[in-house]
Image: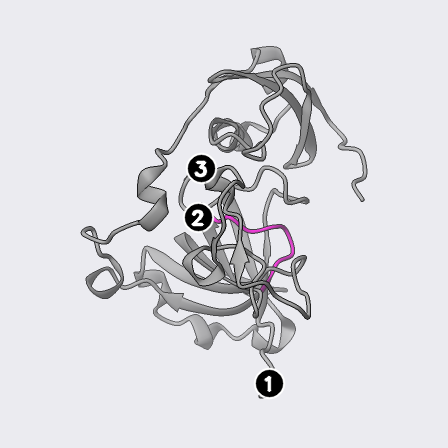
Amino acid sequence: MERHTLRVIARIHSDFPSKFGIPRQSGLVDALRARVVFEPEYRVAEAVRGLEEFSHIWLIWQFSRAVREDWSPTVRPPRLGGNRRLGVFATRSPFRPNALGLSVAGLERVEIDHALGPVLHVTGADLLDGTPIYDVKPYLPYADAHPEALGGFTDQTPRRRLETRCPEALLARVPPEKRDALLGVLAEDPRPSYQSDPDRVYGMAFAGVEVRFTVAGEILTVVDIISEPKARK
């Protein structure tokens, strides 16, 4: 089997230390903020010259916690409740022959840091903290946007947004600049699609806190926010 080596050029620093809670696609929660920091070899300001003129960028990255030698030709998309199998190439499942991800992120600004070189400040990214990035490309609206495109099985499953209730006293435990992002993430319903127990308390690590919540019907209620999340395996 022919093999090629990809170079990790950067890593993203996001508010998600674990997979649970990450939006299922990029761009669903615009209030999310993250930084793309290049690896030492690629900390060259000239390499991003002109990038600040674009509003969005493509990130090509690795599902670093889903790398495996074997693969399955079919998967169970969470959006279909895990009850129907589709071809892996008809989904965005992380369990692929090559564990590659592709995301569009808003480009807020390009910062030239004295120690880190060029740093990309992005919005709406759906990446785990520390995710390795293989490439950055500008998003071109004239070529990349297709409003008439069909969405396959995703067109048949309406997007749900939960009503999120969080007491002000609890929300105050979250850094002010992170609150809108947290509420946006919760509204997207972080739970696995096959879980619907209204009495279950879920825990989600986000931006240095652990958010505990329940979901009954279309209402998500935050029951506690703990400053230091417990270590996860």
Q: Which residue is mark 2?
A: 26
Q: Amino acid at mark 2?
A: Ser
Tag of residue 3 = 1
Q: Secondary structure at mark 2?
A: loop
Q: Residue at x 67, y 25 (%)?
A: 202
- In the image, is 19 to the left or to the right of 152? right
Q: Magenta-highlighted stretch: main secondary structure?
A: loop
Q: Earlier in the sequence, mark 1 or mark 3?
A: 1
Tag of residue 31 = 3
- In the image, is 208 to the left or to the right of 25? right
How much space separates mark 1 and mark 2, taking CA atoms?
A: 29 Å
| Image: magenta residue range | 124-132
Taking the image as drawn, is residue 65 in sight? Answer: yes
Seen in the picture, residue 220 relative to 82 is either above or below; the reply is above
Residue 7 horizontal/vertical position (percent): 59, 77
Q: Secondary structure at mark 3?
A: loop
Tag of residue 55 = none
